[in-house]
Image: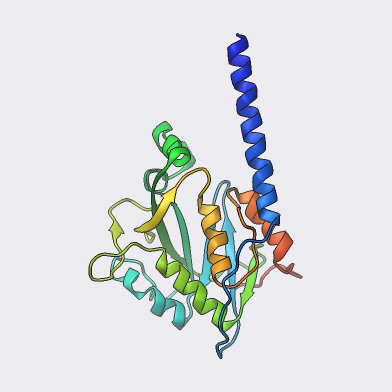
Amino acid sequence: MRLIRNALLALVALVTAYLLAAAAGALIPGPVQEAPERPGPPVTIRLVSGPIHYDLLLPLTPETRAAFAPLARHGLPLEAPGARWLIIGWGAREFYTTTGSYADLSAAAIWRSFTGDASVLRADVTGPLRAGLDLPALTLTAGQYTQLLAAISASFRRDATGAPIPIDAPGFGPTDRFFAAHGRFDILRTCNTWVAAMLRAAGLRFGAWTPTPYAVTLSLARFAPALDSPPAAD
């Protein structure tokens, strides 16, 4: 009985230390890649979160469509008449590709997400955002946005011809697609640390280590300018 109690106490201590370290990592700025000056209007991106995961939400400008045109060859409807935004995120392959909802979570997928798994990128499109939808927004210079697109593109694993490698797995909906990605996913390198790495690669100040959604939220509060009001529909 004492052994079980000690094991539970040790587990609680580890989880607490992990969460405290995540909060500290969110508030300490990580290394930022300087973005070159480039002519062009600023671009506003958004972030969308779930209970455990943040995705990037990119406006489907001509530059965005050109950067991700290779994904359209594998069924991503970038040119659909109603498409206005690209949703993109990075995650554990088994967790991402076998979990249609949290009810589908398996012990194996959870274990591999903690101990290490191959990674994938999930891409989807959506239409205009609903008026009043409260999503964090970041405004990038033209040079920063170009650099963000390049960093995301570099996250895709590619075949010998340089094309992204699709993953044959059912998506969360009818339009999303999975692609092989660089890097291993584990408890230290999560979907949320990838989001932070992409933002820093674009030239934005952001937390050095943000493994949890709360850490990303905390880092946004620390480094991103506050929105004066919810975004209008677009």
Residue 93 relative to residue 138: left or right:
left
Residue 147, position as x, y percentages in the image: 51, 76
- What colour scheme was applied to this rendering of the protein? rainbow
Residue 107 relative to residue 193: left or right:
left
Residue 84, position as x, y percentages in the image: 49, 73
User: Viewer-proximal residue, 139 or 73?
Assistant: 139
Q: Quadrant of residue 20?
A: top right
Residue drawn at x 57%, y 66% as measured from the top left:
199
Residue at the limit of the structure toward the right, as seen here: 228
Residue at the limit of the structure toward the bottom, as seen here: 39
Query: Can residue 83 be seen?
Result: no
Name the quarter where the C terminus is drawn: bottom right
Residue at the limit of the structure toward the left, as seen here: 160
Residue 192, position as x, y percentages in the image: 55, 53
Residue drawn at x 56%, y 89% as measured from the top left:
40
Q: Quadrant of residue 33?
A: bottom right
User: Viewer-proximal residue, 74 or 232?
Assistant: 74
Residue at the limit of the structure toward the top, as seen here: 1
User: Viewer-proximal residue, 181 or 106?
Assistant: 181
Query: Can residue 88 be seen?
Result: yes
In the displayed structure, 164 sits above or below 111; it is below
Q: How many marks?
A: 0
Name the quarter where the N terminus is drawn: top right
Residue drawn at x 44%, y 35% as measured from the top left:
111
Residue drawn at x 60%, y 81% as measured from the top left:
141
Residue 183 relative to residue 199: left or right:
left
